[in-house]
Structures are given as structure tokens and as C-alpha cells.
Image: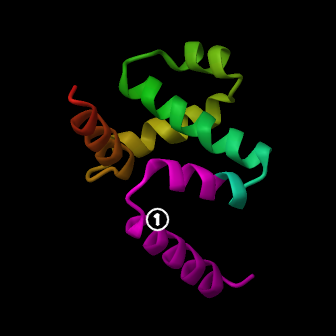
Amino acid sequence: MTDKIISEAVGELSSALALTCSAEEIEDFLGSLLTKAELRAVAARWALVKAIAGGMHQRDIAKRYSLSLCKITRGSRELKKDNSPFRLMLERLKKQQGK
């Protein structure tokens, strides 16, 4: 696949998800789109981002979620970026949950 095709597909997926108002629909969609291994990998990535944002040490995250320090370091770098999409999503989720 070319970068253009991938970019277009990601754009379409993003648009479709933005039109969905139901977390259950998105969960069903992701379950259909991704294999169990891919879904596990995405869920683990999100769990590590939440753990980093919550102040958990990287080695503890690696042990708890059986993840490499490289993946954890990448998540940590992404959280530290200005206008981090990870941080934005975490803040939106906290707001929605009333925390």
C-alpha cells in the first residue's frame, strides 16, 4: 500500500468514527476491523498511556502489561509533546467521566 492510500483510509476511518455517537458501536467496529492480537496491542498501548499519565514508573508498566520499554518510552514522548493527541483524549475522557 502506498502512503497516499494509507492516509486516505485513515482519514475515512477517522471520519466514520467521528460520526459515531455510541461507544458500543465503535467497540463493535474495532472488534470487526482488528484481529484479537491487533485489538490487544491497541488496548495495551492505551493502558500504558493512561499509566504513564497517572505517574506509574516505566519499569512497573513494562512488568504489569508485559510491554517493552521502547513502546513505553514512545508513549511517554508522545504524551510530552505540545498538543499531544494522547493527552487531549485523556482529558476528554476524564471530563466525560466527571473526574
- Main SS of the magenta part reads helix
Neighbours of disc 1 within 10 Å: few (<14), some (14-19), many (20+) = some
| Quarter placement of the C terminus | top left
Which segment is the magenta one? Answer: 1-30
Q: Position of residue 22 (x, y in %)?
A: 42, 54
Is residue 87 left or right of 73 when viewed as pictured?
left
Vertical side of 70 occupied by 7: above or below: below
**Is the N terminus in the top left, top right, bottom left or bottom right quadrant?**
bottom right
Residue labelled with disc 1: 17
Going 62% across and 34% down the picture, which residue do you hit? 44
Q: Is residue 17 above or below residue 66?
A: below
Query: 87 left or right of 10?
Result: left
Magenta-colored stretch includes residue 12: yes
Position of residue 81 measured from the top left corner of the image (x, y, whole percent): 33, 48
| Amino acid type shown at disc 1 | Leu
Q: Residue at x 46, y 65 (%)?
A: 17
Write down the quadrant of residue 33 in the picture.
bottom right
Q: Quadrant of residue 10?
A: bottom right
